[in-house]
Amino acid sequence: MRVPRMFVRSSRCHSAIGGALVISAIVATSARAQARPQPNTSTADSVSVAAALHQFLVAFENLDWPVFRAAFSDSATIFQPVPQMAERVTGPRGIDSTFRAVFAAIRAQARGGPPYQRLEPVDLRIQPLAVGTVLVTFELHSPERVGRRTIVFRREGSTWRIFHLHASSIVRPPGGS
């Protein structure tokens, strides 16, 4: 193999170092070419979390309790967007009692269904934070308010579950967009 001209040095020391660098580069390139490509974990995690988020939102739209509840880790924490539920919700009993009340309120106002509501994420952002942990943020828009959502998903076994959900809402000013 011929060494490219840019690696040829005038002194013996530089020539030896240059040759060693070229050989190292060739060996490293060959090893990389023969190695099996590893899947991009953060991309795979993002795709899996996007699917988990979609499943969660559809379950919430349809008020499908078993699928909705299965989306949460048993150690999840939640901040609701309404003053009547100002305290942090923690664990299975808190999640169950809080969201069963939310489901009942939505059903009471529904004119039909399912779906009982539309949850269409706007400005969705999925950010892997570490192996097995992904941050999701998005907004929910209505004529009256902007709902902001931050969800931390954690992989539990082979399933992505909601480990933390923070929901807040901002009332739009009259005539605002």
Image (tube, helix red, strand yellow):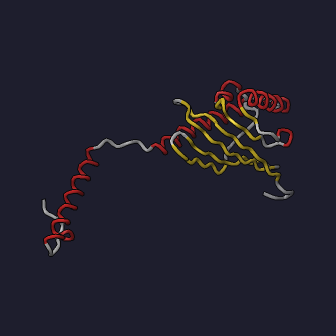
In the rendered view, does 145 fall on the left or right side of 138?
right
In the rendered view, does 154 fall on the left or right side of 27?
right
Q: Residue at x 58, y 37 (%)?
A: 154
Q: Residue furthest front?
A: 13
Up the image or down, 8 lies above or below 155; here it is below
Q: Residue at x 56, y 31 (%)?
A: 156
Q: Residue at x 53, y 29 (%)?
A: 157
Up the image or down, 11 lies above or below 124; here it is below
Which quadrant: the C terminus?
A: bottom right
Q: Position of residue 167 (x, y in %)?
A: 74, 44
In the rendered view, does 18 fall on the left or right side of 91?
left
Q: How many labels, in total? A: 0
Q: Residue at x 20, y 68 (%)?
A: 7
Q: Position of residue 93 (x, y in %)?
A: 75, 26
> In which quarter of the view is residue 109 placed?
top right
Q: Position of residue 27 (x, y in %)?
A: 22, 52
Up the image or down, 30 lies above or below 8; here it is above
Q: Residue furthest top?
A: 66
Q: Position of residue 149 (x, y in %)?
A: 70, 45
Q: Nearer the viewer, residue 15 or 52?
A: 15
Which quadrant: the N terminus?
A: bottom left
